[in-house]
Structures are given as C-alpha cells and as structure tokens.
Image (tube, rainbow, N blue to C red):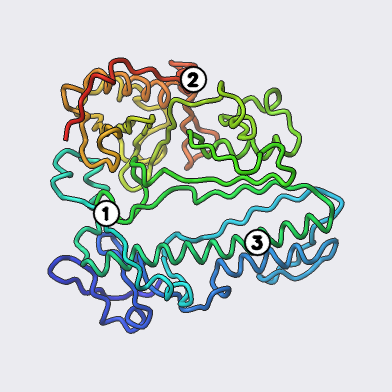
Amino acid sequence: GSKKSFLLNKNGVNNSSSNPVDKELDIVRSYTRNSKSLILAGQSPKPAGETLDGFILKAFTKYLGNPNTTYTSVLGDEIKGPDPKKPVMLSLSFGFPHTPVLPPKSFRDRFKSKHYKIPEFSQTELERLPPQLVKLYKNMKTDGMTKEEKLKTIRDYYAFTAYGDALIGEAIEKFKAYNEKTGRPYLIILTVGDHGWHLGEQGISAKFGPWDKSNHGAMVVVDSRGEAFPRNTVYNDFIEYVDISPTILSAAGAEIDSSLDHLDGFDLAEVIKKPKLKRDYVLGELNQIIGDRAYLRTNRFGFSMKVRPKLGKPGETHKPGEDIRWAINASASDVEMALYDLSCDPNERRNVAYEPEYSAIVKRLREKTQDIFLGDGRLEIDWTKENVSFTSDFAPGAHDRSLSIESTKEISCLL
C-alpha cells in the first residue's frame, strides 16, 4: 500500500534505478498498468523454501506429518492432521509463476545467462485487431522494453517455474510416501496454472487474451495403480479445466454419469479411452480488463468475439440478461471479431476475421459461439444483490462439442 514514484524513459519503459529496493532486487516493473507496480522480473528477497510458495509446501508437509493429531499450523491455527484410515484430498495452490515474478537467487542464477528467442511482434498487427483487443494490448504492452528487460522477464519466468517444479517434486514425493505408509492408492493431478502467460507474444506480458498463450495449459495425471491412467500415455487432443472435477469425483467412486450428469466436463480416465468423448473445439469466456469476450478454438482456427455490449459484469453496467441477443443482432464490426488460421499463422499475428476468403468460416464460428455462450443455459448473476439472476436457453444443446466447417481445405493462407 505504500506509494512510490516511477520514472519512465523516453520509450515509456520503467526505469527503477531510483528505487533502492528495485535496484537491489533487479526488478523490472510493467509500465502500462494503472499502478505501474506489476513486477515482471526480479529476485526474491527470500531464499528457496522461505517464499510464500515454500511455506505452502511447509504447511502441506506439516499436515501429512501429524496424522490423528491436533497441531499448530504455519499460520498459527489449530488443525487436526489426516486420518490414515480415511481417504484424503489436498489442494496445493502454489502461486508461481504468477506475478510478482520473483524467483529465489539460487534458481535465478541458473537462468541468468540463458539465451531465449524474444517473440516477434510488430505494431502493424494492431491495425487488424478490433478495439477491444487493442485496448488489451495498451493495458498490458511490453514491446517498448529494451531487449535486456525482455530477456529478464523471460529468464525469470522460467526460473520461477523451475523453482515451482522443485516444490511440486517435493510435495509429490511426500504425498507418495504418506500413501505408501498408510497403504492407500492415490491419484495426483498436476495442472500448469489456470491460464497461460504471454512473454512478449502479441506485444504483451499478461494473460486475459483469447490467444493460445493465454489459455493453453498442460496437465499430468498419475494413478498409483496405472489402471485408470496407464503409464507413459500422452494425450494431445483437447481437454478443459471443467474435466478436473468429474475426474476427481469419479476416482473417489462417484457415478458421474447419473447423479452428477450436470457437470460440464468429462472424466479424463474415460477421455483417453473413448473416441466418442472427443471434442472438436474448446471454449472460454473472459470478463476482466477489457470486458466480456468469448473464444472458441479448433485445431485449425482460433476465433473470438464480443458477446455482451457493456464492458462490465452484471450488476455493474447492466442487469442480468439485459439485451441478451445483442451480439446476434449486432453488425460484424460491432462484435469485434478475431480469427486466426493456425495452419499458416500458429503465432496468431494476422487477424483474418474480415477477409472475404474466410467469410463462410467466420459465419459458422460466430453462429456456434453465439448459440453456446448466449443461448445454451447461460446464467448471469447480479453479484451485488441476493438471488438476482437470469437464465438464457434459446439454443439448448448448442454446446455439443461437435463442429463441422465446410470448404476449409480450399482456403489458402493469407500471409
């Protein structure tokens, strides 16, 4: 909460040398956010194991080490340890590699001299972007940084991730040892964040975008018996975070096909075995920084559009369900579409949503996106009031995970 002054050089890049703490820890801050305080690189003032993430591991270790015992946690709370005769579920929500990006010195030093290719970006790309995505760029841009500053943000991000990998490794070994001691099988689900992170792609260091770097993650699932999740199996097709809940519940013995059939996701143990659970697309919706925007991605196309006219949440700028069909009736320009042909533009640098060659594909993707996000059981809630909500269901069944797009093979890449 302390106030600090920031000096910007002529390129708008943060010059933190006047701040003794920033200088000591070699910190690189963002220079576009309102607070200009987001830390994108630097050294943690704490050694490995003594950071916030380190204390999460300490809390986890202490819990497993006190079975059937009431003990004092690392935060001073009285907690009862696990019952070895009962199943246990634990969630370790490490913060890394979220901002502030501050890897401990021992890890940072390992990456200081590594050379990484800085992602390519040209401001001419903005000419094809709709206003909503240009706004995101302006709020998150880092393309004005020096080459050295850009390298620091990349090196320190990877150093922070490496530190996190080490903590995860320790946690997994401790959990496996606990289950071996208690004679219990186990399931471990490791997800790489709830989002991805741009390290200069699209000219930003951020999330919140409809691009691949913002929403592409990875998951590792380990089954101690190797039955539900056979060892050395790699699945490269689409999955979504909504799959985590049914996967856990199914592993615990719940019948997700009956009493829990309202869940949106699949049991991943079934996904890797049954072709009928295959998805033609994945989807998501954003409502931070630039307002509401939905995206739908197939193996070849990355599509996104504005689905609500107001740049706020229900209860802030509009009532739940207000003008729910706005996007359907709006012009192509008003819904601010973006389309990337990933077959020739995997780095998503040229928006072709308004190119005539792609008009039929855009029409199909727009219709599918609108029906799913606006008409297939959409629930909007006014979080400022009690029990005020709206459900829209004018296109039931639109989200069937199936999407056929005709004549895509005939389209040549526009580069």
Q: Which residue is mark 1?
A: 119
Looking at the image, which is closer to me, 379 or 169? 169
Report the quarter where the N terminus lies: bottom left
Specify the label residue 27 is tagged with: none
Label 2 neighbour load within 10 Å: few <14, some 14-19, many 20+: few
- Which sits earlier in the primary sequence, circle 3 or circle 2? 3
Q: Amino acid at mark 2?
A: Asp
- Which sits earlier in the primary sequence, circle 1 or circle 2? 1
Label 3 neighbour load within 10 Å: few <14, some 14-19, many 20+: some
Q: Which residue is mark 3?
A: 171
Discs 3/2, front? 3
Q: Amino acid at mark 1?
A: Pro
Residue 302, compared with residue 28, is above or below; it is above
Residue 303 placed where, x, y %?
32, 31
Residue 137 placed where, x, y %?
24, 50
The CA span between labels 1 and 2 is 36 Å
Instruction: Tell me what residue is drawn at x 20 percent, y 31 percent.
Output: 352
Quarter of the rendering containing residue 172? bottom right
Q: Which residue is mark 2?
A: 400
Number of numbered discs overlaid on the protein picture: 3
Instruction: Tell me what residue is drawn at x 17 percent, y 44 percent.
Output: 125
Quarter of the rendering containing residue 372? top left
Report the quarter where the C terminus lies: top left
Q: Amino acid at mark 3?
A: Ala
Circle 2 SS class: loop
Residue 273 placed where, x, y %?
62, 28
Residue farthest toward the front in the current orientation of the protein: 232
> Is residue 20 in view?
yes
- Which sits earlier in the primary sequence, circle 3 or circle 1? 1
The CA span between labels 3 and 2 is 38 Å
Looking at the image, which is closer to me, 289 or 51? 51
